Structures are given as structure tokens and as C-alpha cells.
Image (cartoon, rainbow, N blue to C red):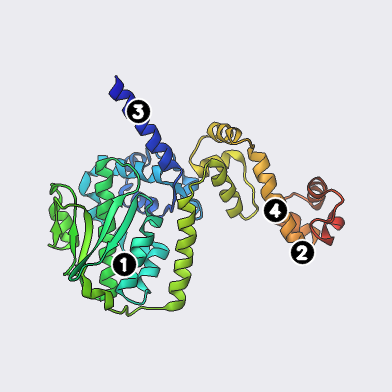
Amino acid sequence: MVRLKYDILRHMTERSTLEKLPMTSVYFRLILRSFGDTPEHRAAVLAGTGVTDDMLRDRSADISAFQQVRQVENVIGLFGEGWAARVPELWDNSSHGALTVAAVVAPNLAGIMEVLSRFVFVRGPFHRASLRRGPRRSRLSIEPAVVLPEKVWRSLIEILFISVRATLTSVLMAPPSEVRFHFAWPEPAHAAEVRAVLGESVVYNASDNAIEFPSVWFTLESPFADATLYDAALGELRAASARIAAPVDLRGRVERLLSSLPSGRCTADHAARLLGVSSRTLVRRLAEAGVSYRELVDAELRGRAERLLKEGGLSRARIAEELGYSDPSSLSRACRRWFGSRRTAGSSTASLG
């Protein structure tokens, strides 16, 4: 009984941690498209994730790491642990956004490995990487950043290694035959499928999960080096890193969602669907944070109104349209409530009041 209680509490803690970690929905959509090929498979791949069609259609909406982990668990249950190696095309360079861009256009292989060691967790917040240089061979080691089920962790490592190999192949313009892929678990039944993708230099029962490569590679220049694009991609990765380093609660996710919407507003029910929670959960958890959904929408609209009024150049009718008001009079009433008679939003505020 004591052990059961401990396991339940640990599971609740792990889920809470994963729910606070935002991540891109790209991988979720790719996996669903590839393995949700029938209505039955689609339902099974989505089971328990809380991810809705609205969330999948909104390319700006994040999912949580918990939702991604749950999907991977579902796919393993349907197709076994070898599933990731059967679709290596899912993990090519186009899947990884700014991470791949920064790696490919880095000045040299040293820059590529630095990018991977510093930012690999941006696309997969389950991982932490460290780079160790040696006189002859060097290692990029991968450790779990959160506690995960072993089967899930093994699948995520296989995906990561397949992805890194694709990046190295692009930059070297040839298969990276001198790379060794170390897995810190016994050889599985699907090892032949893994070797078919990664090559024969796959080592099981290793001391850690690591990618080992010749140290002389650090001096190799990338044929795609682009300083401007490299700096831009690094900037995007740093911003994403800051978001993950300080996980947000549901209030922060709602605020980020509202700021990404064209009019800065949507119904609470629609927001709940986009965030993968029930409407009741949304109301309850915002109340626990001391705020209501309506107050968050109002704060977003006020901020947008103040900015538009300060900038000037838009008519009252146009500003009302931008903010999703049915008519200019509704905007005027809102401005009187927000700003009163003070000219805090510039001269235009008075004319709207």
C-alpha cells in the first residue's frame, strides 16, 4: 500500500512537471499524420492527450510535454518500440525549426555541436545535452531532463539520434560513417531497424546515451555557413530556451494564447479546447491563480488599445475592428472604463471617449 501511494504521488508530480513544459506541436502533428491512418488508429493515438482538432489547426498553439509523452506512449502501445526507426523521414531537417537552421548554417562542426548541446531541449524539453571533447574522439551525451517511462525515453533517444544523423549528413554531404551511436540499454528486438537507419556503428549496453565522433571534425567548415541566418536562429532559440527555463502555469498559457490571436479574444470554451483542458478546469485553475478568464481578455484588449492609440493613424472604427468590437461605441465605453478622462493613451484616447 505504501509503495502504491508513492507511485501515485510520483506520477502526479511527473505529470505536473510535464504539463508546465511548453513545446511545439510539430512532432505531434507529424506522428498523428503518420500513425493515425485510420479512424481507429487516430482515436488511439489521441487518447488521453487532450489535444483537439482546434489545437492542431492552430499552428501557433503550443502543446505541453505531457501531451507529447502521452502520444508517444499511445504509439508504442499500438506499434511497439521500433516505431520511430520505421519512419526516419519524419525526423529529417525540416522537422526541427530553428534548431536545425542554426546547426546547418553554423560556421563549422564545432558550432553545430555547440548548438545541439545548448539548445536540443528547446525542441524536446525531455533532454539535456553535454559536449565533451577528447584528443581523438568527442561525445555529445544526452540525459533525461524529467522522469519518463523507460519505453518513452528509449523512443525519444532514437528519434534524437536519427535527427542528429540527418543534420550531420546534410553538412558533411555524405553519411556520417565515423559516428557511433551509444544506447544505455540492452539490445532490443528492433535493433536491426535502428541499424538500418543509423548504420552499423550502433552500440548497446553503453555507459550513457551519446553520439561519438572524430574530434578532427571540429575544424570542418559547414558549406551552408550563413552568419546572418545563424544569429537570427540563435536569437529564436534563446527566446524559446527562456520560456522553457521558466515554465508557465495555465494563466501564462492563456495570456500567451490571447496575445497570439488576431483580435486578442476568443470564448473561454474555445480557449480551453486550444489549451487541451476542460472549460471547468480552465475556470477553476484561473480562479486558483486569482484571476478570471474575462479579466485576462480585458487586460489583453486594454494593452492592444493603448498601443494602437499611441501609434495613431487608425480611425476609431478601424481600431474597434482590430480589437473585435462590434461597433466604435463599444470601444469608446471600454476606453472610458480603462482610461477614464486621463490622456494615458495619447490624444486619441480623449476622442474615443
Q: Amino acid at mark 3?
A: Ile
Local crowd at mark 1 within 10 Å, few (<14), some, or many (≥20)?
many
Residue that numbered label 2 is attached to: 314
Determine whether the residue tagged by mark 2 lies in a helix, strand or loop: loop
Q: Residue at x 39, y 69 (%)?
A: 101
- Image coordinates of residue 350 in percent, x first then y, are 86, 56
Residue that numbered label 4 is attached to: 303
Q: Amino acid at mark 4?
A: Gly
Determine whether the residue tagged by mark 3 lies in a helix, strand or loop: helix
Determine whether the residue tagged by mark 4 lies in a helix, strand or loop: helix
Residue that numbered label 3 is attached to: 8
| Residue 323 appearing in the image | no
Which of pointers 2 and 4 indicates the residue nearer the eye? 4
Q: Amino acid at mark 2?
A: Leu
Taking the image as shown, residue 238 lies to the left or right of residue 27, namely right
Which label's residue is closer to the chain start, 3 or 1? 3
Which label's residue is closer to the chain start, 1 or 4? 1
Q: Amino acid at mark 1?
A: Met
Determine whether the residue tagged by mark 1 lies in a helix, strand or loop: helix
Q: Residue at x 48, y 66 (%)?
A: 235
Which of pointers 1 and 4 indicates the residue nearer the eye? 1
Using the image as rendered, state which of residue 307 and residue 237 is in the foreground: 237
